[in-house]
Amino acid sequence: RGRGRGRGRGRGRGNWSKDPALEAAKALNREIIEAETPQELLELFTSRGGAKGLAGGGAFNSVNFSTALHRLARIASAYHAEGADAQAETRRAVLSDPRFAIFVCSVAEAIVGVDPNQSSSSIDLGEAGAEGRVAKTSEGKPGALFTFSSREFSNIAWAISKLSFAPPASVFPNVYMYGRSYATQDGTSLATTEDMVQDFITTSLKVRAQVLEVAKERNALPDSAKGQVKSRWIPTLSQLGGKLLDLVAVFSLETLTTFNSQEVANLLYSFATAGRADSILFNKLAQRLIEVTDETKARGWDRPKPQECSNSVWSFATSGIVGSGQRALVCHVANRLEEDGGSFAAQFKTQELSNTAWASAVLLSKRGNEDEETIRREEVGDGTTSTAEEDDAVARILRCVASSLIGRTSEFKPQELSNSIWAMATVGFGTVDSQAANPHNGYIYIKSDSYEEDRDLVSRTLDAVARSAGSRLNRFRPQELNNLAWGFARLGHRGEAAQELVHGIGQELLKRKQYFKPQDIGTCLWSFAQMEYFDTEVFTVAASRLNRRYGRSFKPQECSNACWALATAGMVPKYTSAFDTTLLPAAERPSLDDIRDDPVTECFATAAAEIMRRPDEFKEQEIKDILWGFSRVEIRHPKLFKMVAEYLVGTDDTSEQGRGLGGFSPQGLGNLAWSFAKQAQLSSSVTGGARLHVGTSGRQAVYETSCLDFGEKQVNRLFARIAEEAINGKGGMERFSPQDLTNTCWSLAVLGLLHRGYFDAVKESVTRRLYKNFAMSEGKGSLYPLFKSQEIANLVWSYATLNVEAPEMIDIIADYTVTICSGDKQYDESSISRFFKRQELANLSWSLAVLQQYPPDLVALTYKGLLGSGGIEGVERLNRLYDDGGMQTQQIMTLFYVQMALDMEAPQLGLSLPNGFPDAWVETSSLFSNNDSTSSSLLEINSSRLQINIGKTLEKIGFEHVQEHIIGAEDIFSIHNHEIDTSSFPADFLSIDIANLEQKIGIEVDGPAHFINVLDDDSESSLLPRHLDKIDDGGGRSFKTKSNKVAWSFLNDGRRSVNGPTALKHRLLCHLGWCIVHCPFWEWQGLRGDVDAEEEYVKELLEEVIG
């Protein structure tokens, strides 16, 4: 028994070999083993009188009981030639057989030592009678009528778990008694083990009584009607099964030193399978397994088998139990795999290797469920295994499994292959991010000190798996296919074999689409997108499986994965205007039938409907991915975005604060901000009978759309909370990647929102990172590319648009950019084009002009990158380097403004536009106009109603003026005597809303597009000087124009500041000799049409310049 343990435990009657009772028990055991069906076993039990008394009436001993129950379970759970349904029917027949119920009662009663000579009616369960009639057999004390060994406890637990009739602890709580009191499910307090045993016997007798009642009822009926009487004892029998497992746990711990490794592993497996695991029990069992292994090794005995190691770790993972015992076990298994040069690992079956890898990864992923204080306390040197040691152990386990996969790939079954790759991917084994402590997302990464070796090992493993799996994908189940695809995508593996594998998985999805569950669909699509496998047919067919008909059954992750993947793959829905209730009337939006005709549109519609119906079920990442998906494929959905905004941060109209943003990752916050900003920016692409005011375009259209969609206060509230979470969240600004920072800055700038605290924190963080990057690169000959070109351009553009000075940040960015583009030699057009796109250079140069900061090397770099150095002859070379047809109209206009600023503010740089500009550089002959919200154009020649009204008032007081005075580029550059051909310059370059040409006085009527809203200014006073004190505040609502269009009346709260484009235009006009005064829109609106107040206002306005 158990390799030398468990012997000599019995009734102590001398020579067992001559004991007739023992010989009879052995003979009975042989009959039990030879039984081939459950019916034979149960008939054997009843024919020997086992059903006539308690505890089997003395017909069976402990070995007979455990062998019979083990045999029953093995037969009932064995593979059936007629399939899984036939196997399930065998199990059902066993559990519904009344003889089985009596047999389980007998096993339970025998364990607690009930006298088999008693009948159920003779037991008094009152306080006075129970203790004297229940033998205390857990330690084999004198008087015990049955003695169950460690092997028998192990077999009984295994059998109960395989028969699956004990309820999990989530349904019927454990009733363990580890020297502590416990309240049962009905609230009864169990103060001692004796109380637990008494409760146990009560349940057993209740099962017996119910079996008897049902038998009497059935006997009173004809055979045809007997089946109408239900087996009412089964629920109570199920409870008894749970309590029996719990009792085995208690008694096993009392005799734990007698258990060998196989018995310990069986107990772990049994409790995990039955769902009745307990951390105290599992930690003790793990400790015992390690002890017995060390003991057998020291004595030279047979060591534990591979299955025992694998099943033990698997049991912890399946139960979700993490802690010191679990970590010690993982390290123990890793050590064993490396024993004797890996010879022990070679003994593992492929399933055992796969299960070990899977379990190790699962346990690492569940570490966050453990109390942080417990982890900290366990790692201060009390002898327990630290999390760092566990990380190392998991890495060693995965190295062993990866090596085995390379050499034994063909031996691994589909599930084993997919689970092994899934395990490596789950912990980021061998990925780039395994080098970093903070990879800026919610994934798990085990730190590797042998990254290059691990990466090479993983690469060879994935190639081997791809080749092996690719030829037998038809044998993989859908879940195995999606796990395989996800693993390759998460590990970032590319290559011909990997691409062929992913293509094969896509083809399997087409062939077997009806068998793929939503989870399989969502994961496969996510993986395909990550692997850049964009097969339109595969994506369309997959999307068709995620439709509104079954939407309520979809899990949040399935919705979010599908939206993210479709967007990443560029699968643009046919009906992008389907949900735009702000800008399009119902008659111009597609119908529900139209939406159903396009699988991609319907997939997005389904995701939106589900997140709006049950937002509490969606994790932050899932919310972010769905919103990002909508904005990425340019679908406007105002109702969805408004609901999410209110759900996350509440509203000003209620006291509710919303769910909050604390659960969003840094990337999640950045993408959330980007998604909302993009929704407003998409207004320019809406076609048809748009309800947005026809007079708005560019920047104002974006501002106005965001307010119409969500409300101005709601927009401000959401983005203020995003900024505050970024600043104050755990980890501070350093947890944000450059892209995360840039996305948030860009989003705020597009919507004209400034959070001074956030932008101050960003410039401090960026400056610190770049200085650190220079310091770390010193002596290495090259600079690490910390920020990408788009991130540099968008970041500086955001500061310029919001008119936020950041001189130190700009200077270090200049040094960084020049160094990156130079490499080990002086930069040229070729090196610049490898880092920057043409539009990024144009945005960067414009931003420097707005900020009035001109780092010489950086400005010169932008000019060389945009204009080249060879005049007209070098233009074709530039076009080839950038792989485009030349500069776009907006870029040409940008350079005009930049050149004008340089001429007036930084002439010492000696930079100028080349002869022949812009004709040779321009891509097309399109007009010099742009409605883009990020346009750098300073030309506005549409007179607003506000501007016209102010002009009329000025006429009343005798101020001579013209509306929309235009200043041409030819005039500007001829003034500065540039010897260049200006014939192709735009005639219209700068405009002044209201101008007195004689005195060169200009009045700029500044609408909402000229200002930014300062989110973290709580003062009631205006950030800009007011021209009159008696101005009525208001705004913040939508209204209809005379043409029945919807527009927005902006808030008149005064918490506004001039934006960058307006500041640049003001400076340029002043350089040209104009005296400019500004009339903010809210001041004039606040006069409410009072004619006298309006005249007084314009007089006060003119005093600023005429005086």
Image (cartoon, rainbow, N blue to C red):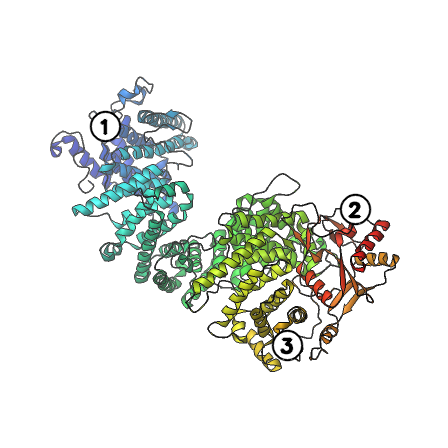
N-terminal of the two: label 1 or label 3? 1
| CA distance for labels 1 and 3 | 103 Å
Residue 1012 percent across, percent down from the top left: 67, 55
The dot on residue 1030 is 2
Query: What secondary structure is found at the residue carrying circle 1?
Result: helix
Query: What secondary structure is found at the residue carrying circle 3?
Result: loop
Q: Is residue 930 left or right of residue 75?
A: right
| CA distance for labels 2 and 1 | 103 Å
Q: Is residue 1076 left or right of residue 82?
A: right
The dot on residue 921 is 3
Q: Amino acid at mark 2?
A: Lys
Image quadrant occupied by the N terminus: top left
User: Is residue 995 positioned above or below 612 on the image?
Assistant: below
Q: Nearer the viewer, mark 2 or mark 3?
A: 2
Residue 1105 percent across, percent down from the top left: 78, 59
Query: What secondary structure is found at the residue carrying circle 2?
Result: loop
Q: Nearer the viewer, mark 2 or mark 1?
A: 2
Q: Is residue 321 left or right of residue 1099?
A: left
Q: Amino acid at mark 3?
A: Trp
